[in-house]
Structures are given as C-alpha cells and as structure tokens.
Image (cartoon, coloured by chain):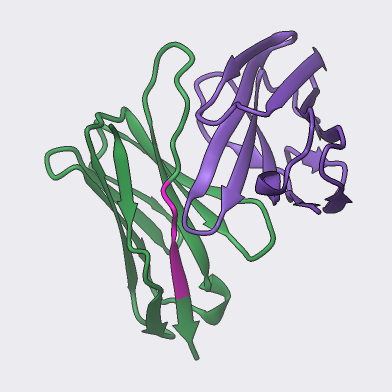
Amino acid sequence: DVKVTQSSRYLVKRTGEKVFLECVQDMDHENMFWYRQDPGLGLRLIYFSYDVKMKEKGDIPEGYSVSREKKERFSLILESASTNQTSMYLCASSPPGYLGYTFGSGTRLTVV
Amino acid sequence: SQKIEQNSEALNIQEGKTATLTCNYTNYSPAYLQWYRQDPGRGPVFLLLIRENEKEKRKERLKVTFDTTLKQSLFHITASQPADSATYLCAPGRSGGYQKVTFGTGTKLQVIP
C-alpha cells in the first residue's frame, strides 16, 4: 500500500514563526500536493509538484512556499505564520495522470 | 468560474437502505471524476474513479454514475452500514498537462442502526 506520512498530527506555533510541514511518500510517485482544509471551504490546493525541484502554484499560494529536493519528500513552508493559516493541512501523492490521490493523515496547525 | 456542488446538509439514512449522494458541476468539462471518503480528523481515502466515456462503475457495494449531459455524478452505497458513516467528497478532474483536481466540500452521511 502507498503510504503518505506527514511528520506531525498536531502543531501549535506562534504568529511570525517560520513553520515547516514535512511529507514523505514511499511509492515513487511523481506528483505531490499540499492542500488545506477548512470547514465550509473544502480542500484548497496550495502548491503541487510534478517532479524533483519542480513546483506549480495552486489556488491559494500566498504566504506559503514549498521544497522538493528528493522525489519522496515534499515540504510546505509557512514563511511567517499568521492566525489565518490555522487549518488542517493535507499532503497527497499520485502517479502520473492525477488518478487516485493518496493522502496523509493531516497536520492540524494552530497559530496563536 | 468552475463550481462543484455537493449537498452541504448531512444525509441520514437507515441501516440496510441505499444511500445516494449527488455531485453537480458547472462551467467545467471533466474527463473523469473521483470519489473519496473522509473520516473526522483523517485524510480522504480514494474510493472510485469514473471516466467521461463510462456511464457506471461498481466496486463491491459502491456504484458511481457519470452523466456529462446533466453535469452530474451520483454515488450509491447499497445495503448501507453504520461503518459507512463518513463525509464523501467528489473530485472532477481534467486530463492533459499539469491539470489539478478540484474537490467538492463533501456530503456527510450518517447511517442509523
């Protein structure tokens, strides 16, 4: 089974901190994604990557950056955390063709 | 702009009945449509994918239909069980290039014993 592992289930950070969310997948998938999920808004795409060192902005990239130095690892960076970035963050991976995403368990981030 | 609509209200059904969830989309011509299940506090889990040239897809007690004329997909769970209680998300997608999948907000299903 494909596994997508997110490094933390819960995180509490202070406003202005730089925050790193890590995601690792073990099935050699080319594509990796970061979403945030908020009540009533559903899943919104922040960034995705289709290859090492390649990235594309999603629908809400402002305030975020990403890094993909190795195929199995995709990091989301909050450059200066703000309270409106309190959310559930979900990482996903997929083979080429974007069919059948495998999601991690999510990181619930609270910015205080 | 493209819009995906799922019933925002929860769907309550009796155990053993068939649950039917609806996904409507506008300003969009997806080549395929995915359905996911999400339990509270967890990431979505992929269930089924149906392509635009397929009318119906089945997997065990699950059935999905895709009507490109009506711009609608229906997701059925037959002989529903309390363990089927979860939120179900639809996700239409286009093929080609670096197209991304867009998720609906989901419908919460509650199966009552």
Of residue A92 and residue A110, the one placed in the foreground of this image is A110
Q: Position of residue B28 (x, y in %)?
A: 25, 31
Of residue A40 and residue A100, the one placed in the foreground of this image is A40
Vertical arrangement, residue B68 with respect to residue A74, above or below: below
Q: Position of residue B76 (x, y in %)?
A: 34, 63
The residue segment tinted magenta is B104-109
Vertical arrangement, residue B99 with respect to residue A107, above or below: above
Colour that chain A carries in the picture: purple
Q: Most extreme residue toward the left, as rendered?
A: B69
Residue B72 included in the magenta stretch of the image:
no
Vertical arrangement, residue B97 with respect to residue B62, above or below: above
Colour that chain B carries in the picture: green
Q: Position of residue B69 (x, y in %)?
A: 12, 39
Q: Position of residue B60 (x, y in %)?
A: 46, 59
A89 to the left or right of A5: left
A25 to the left or right of A45: right
Q: Most extreme residue toward the top, as rendered?
A: A53
Image quadrant of residue B53? top left
